[in-house]
Image (spheres, grey):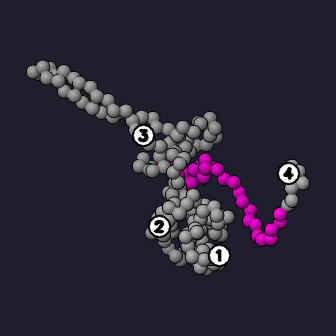
Amino acid sequence: YFGGCPVLTAQGRSYPVTDTFLEDILATTGHVLPPDSPCRVSDHGTWNKATFNLHRGGQASTQEWKEAGAATNPDYDEGRYAAYPPGVHAVLSQLNESAINHDLIMELVDYIDLNLGDGAVLVFLPGFADISTLYNTMSSSRRFGDRAAFRVLPLHSSLSPAEQSAVFDVMPTGVRKVVLATNIAE
């Protein structure tokens, strides 16, 4: 296919990777998008204004109201997800695909911990800000802040080499390592 292109072989370990898509994760976790979620498509709605004549005294009254718009994900295609339950449609139709859903990530890590056995979890995030936000949220939560059960570790270029190497530490029995990294960690 590549017309005699040289092949590079590198020593090391590889781990099996399974592709799981967002709609499958939503169905598995039962994630619900809260009305105030930053991951929800903004609903700007339409402001209306009308003036009404009052029967008494010939006066007029003006009222304003906002009609909720049908803010939907422009990339949502109902037919594409026909095999999925209504909850998946509800999330996908309202999902702002430009926002990182930290709540969903935490729900998924929780699901992995409760259902998929031992092992570390590697979460790829787009950059330092998302790593820091998710790290702070997870570390301060009752569930993931329990160091007897979890070690949440950031991995990005701003950390010292000693801090970066902590992701390779073997965890004690019963402790799940969760690494929050950019794709450079790959």
Q: Is residue 94 above or below residue 151?
A: above
Mark 1 or mark 4, which is nearer the start of the sequence? Answer: 4
Q: Is residue 179 above or below residue 40?
A: below
Q: Which residues are magenta?
A: 8-33
Q: Main secondary structure of the magenta part?
A: loop
Residue 2's mark? Answer: 4
Q: Which residue, given by chain and number where applicable, does mark 3 sit on?
A: 43
Q: Is residue 70 visible?
A: yes
Q: Position of residue 133 (x, y in %)?
A: 48, 63
Query: Contact, CB < 8 Å: mark 3 with mark 2?
Result: no
What separation in Å lies between label 3 and label 1 (alpha carbons)?
Answer: 44 Å
| Amino acid residing under circle 4 | Phe
Residue 136's mark? Answer: 2
| Amino acid residing under circle 2 | Asn
Q: Position of residue 148 (x, y in %)?
A: 53, 77
In depth, the one of 128 and 92 nearer the eye is 128
Q: Which residue, given by chain and number where applicable, does mark 1 sit on?
A: 168
Q: Is residue 4 magenta?
A: no
What separation in Å lies between label 4 and label 1 (alpha carbons)?
Answer: 36 Å
| Amino acid residing under circle 1 | Phe
Mark 2 or mark 3, which is nearer the start of the sequence? Answer: 3
